[in-house]
Amino acid sequence: MIELPRAAVCAGSIAKEVDFLSFGTNDLTQMTFGFSRDDARKYLDAYIEAGILKKDPFITIDREGVGALMQMAIERARESNPEIKIGVCGEHSGDPESIEFLGGGTRRIHCPGCLNKQMRKPGSITGSMRRHCTRRQKPSVSSGTTRVAHSIPA
């Protein structure tokens, strides 16, 4: 699980020893920003209103920081192990903008257990994901014991 910036930087070395890597986007976001997700609610809206942040980084992947770390990690991992499988686990897997971005190197997105109930509702996150990604290749998306295939970028 790549949850720390150092792990992302060292992904090439890690990839030599494993068959897959999964990014824990919630923890990676917290550690990259140095924000506690629990405390960030107190000031994130002010940061967004002031233009310091474009979006809430706990909802949509911060492409310039967290996303850049992820891209670097994927490149380094694939240089060391071209067959490595890359996945993502976290609430970002329910955000269409993040799904589009994550498709740049991931093949598997795991929706956290808290989304299980949502995935069964019509018009839910899963429905949104399907509509958003219908023209793309199909990695697997899983939620707990439920596995649902969605088309997202390769």
Image (cartoon, helix red, strand yellow):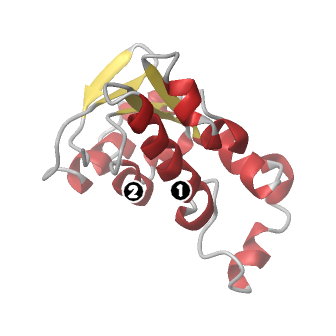
The disc placed on residue 25 is none
Image-based side of 60 in relation to 131, left or right: right
The one of 73 and 131 positioned closer to us in this rendering = 73
User: Where is residue 86 shown, x and y percent of the image?
Assistant: 41, 32
* Amino acid type shown at disc 1: Gly
* Amino acid type shown at disc 2: Phe
Find disc 1 in the rendering and name its residue: 67
Element type at mark 1: helix
The one of 150 and 5 positioned closer to us in this rendering = 5
Q: Residue at x 79, y 59 (%)?
A: 41
The disc placed on residue 101 is 2
Callout 1 touching callout 2 (CB < 8 Å): yes
Image-based side of 142 in relation to 69, left or right: left
Q: Residue at x 24, y 44 (%)?
A: 154
Classify mark 2: residues with Cα within 10 Å, few (<14), some (14-19) or many (20+): some
Instruction: Answer whether residue 109 is visible to the viewer in this image.
Output: yes
Element type at mark 2: helix
Mark 1 or mark 2, earlier in chain: 1
Above or below, comparing residue 105 to residue 20 in the picture? below
Mark 1 vs mark 2, CA separation in Å: 8 Å
Q: Residue furthest left?
A: 135
Image-based side of 118 in relation to 29, left or right: left
User: Where is residue 153 shown, x and y percent of the image?
Assistant: 25, 49
